[in-house]
Amino acid sequence: DIQMTQSPSSLSASIGDRVTITCRASQGIGDALAWYQQKSGKAPKRLIYAASTLQSEVPSRFSGSGSGTEFTLTISSLQPEDFATYYCLQHYTFPWTFGQGTKVEIK
Amino acid sequence: EVQVLESGGGLVQPGGSLRLSCAASGFTFSGQSMNWVRQAPGKGLEWVSLITARGDTTYYRDSVKGRFTISRDNSKNTLFLQMNSLRAEDTAIYYCANGKDNPFYYWGQGTLVTVSS
């Protein structure tokens, strides 16, 4: 199975901060990587697909980059509604695997 | 408007069975692969199974192979998950979600399965 190592597992940040979350795949996955945001008690929401394509209706402060084994989700200026848990997903090969999640909290 | 609605969760004893359903509308259900994704209480997301659009190919994670069966009825825009020989570690919210090439855009609200005596 491909392991997705996501870091950090949690972070505290202030409104307006730039936030970066990283996922590392245990083997190359091309650009078969997506990012999801999950708020407490809700279903996840897709933010980014194909590693760097912004989902329509998602604010442009979110961006994704990377290919192969190293991927990054960046929030350029953290807003109050961005406090949530973020997950990466590799769908290059079965079983598809998620990162363990990054909880973004208010400092 | 897209709607995805899971049902069928509940409390079941270890070794028991449950059948989950997912009713979809607002998108071309018959044209998309569909998935089940689960989340144990307080834990992360875990992909469980995928069925292709025509239902002719299925994939499972190892821990559920031989116990869970995914199926679909495209005439009723409904996805199913038959879960047998349930274990405590299957306790989770089960979500239905679409897609294979760029997966998990549409999600349901989830249905809770609790395996406990």
Image (cartoon, coloured by chain):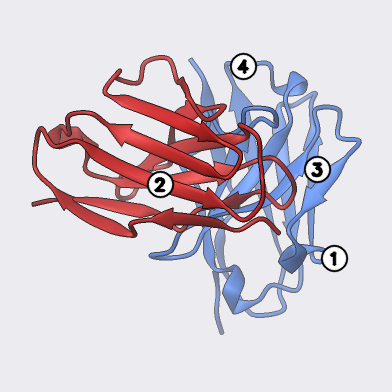
Chain colours: A red, B blue
The residue to which callout 4 is attached is: B27
Judge whether B70 appears above or below B4 on screen.
Answer: below
Q: Residue at x 48, y 15 (%)?
A: B1
The residue to which callout 1 is attached is: B66
Q: Quadrant of the N terminus of chain A?
A: bottom right
Q: Residue at x 80, y 27 (%)?
A: B53
Dot 2 surroundings within 10 Å: few (below 14), some, or many (20 or more)?
Answer: many
Circles 1 and 2: CB distance less than 8 Å? no
Disc 1 residue type (three-letter): Gly
State the image coordinates of residue A48 (x, y, percent, origin top left). Answer: 46, 28
Circles 4 and 3: CB distance less than 8 Å? no
Can residue B116 be seen from the camera position used here? yes
Dot 1 surroundings within 10 Å: few (below 14), some, or many (20 or more)?
Answer: few
Disc 4 residue type (three-letter): Phe
Residue in front for this viewpoint, B84 or A65 = A65
Marks 3 and 2: which is nearer the front?
A: 2
Marks 4/3 same chain: yes
What secondary structure is marked by label 3? strand
Query: The numbered mark 4 sits on a residue in which chain?
Result: B
Marks 2 and 4: which is nearer the front?
A: 2
Marks 1 and 2: which is nearer the front?
A: 2
Residue in front for this viewpoint, B4 or A71 = A71
What secondary structure is marked by label 1? loop
Query: The numbered mark 2 sits on a residue in which chain?
Result: A
Circles 1 and 4: CB distance less than 8 Å? no
Query: The numbered mark 1 sits on a residue in which chain?
Result: B
Q: What label sits on residue B71 in the rendered view?
A: 3
The residue to which callout 2 is attached is: A22
What secondary structure is marked by label 2? strand
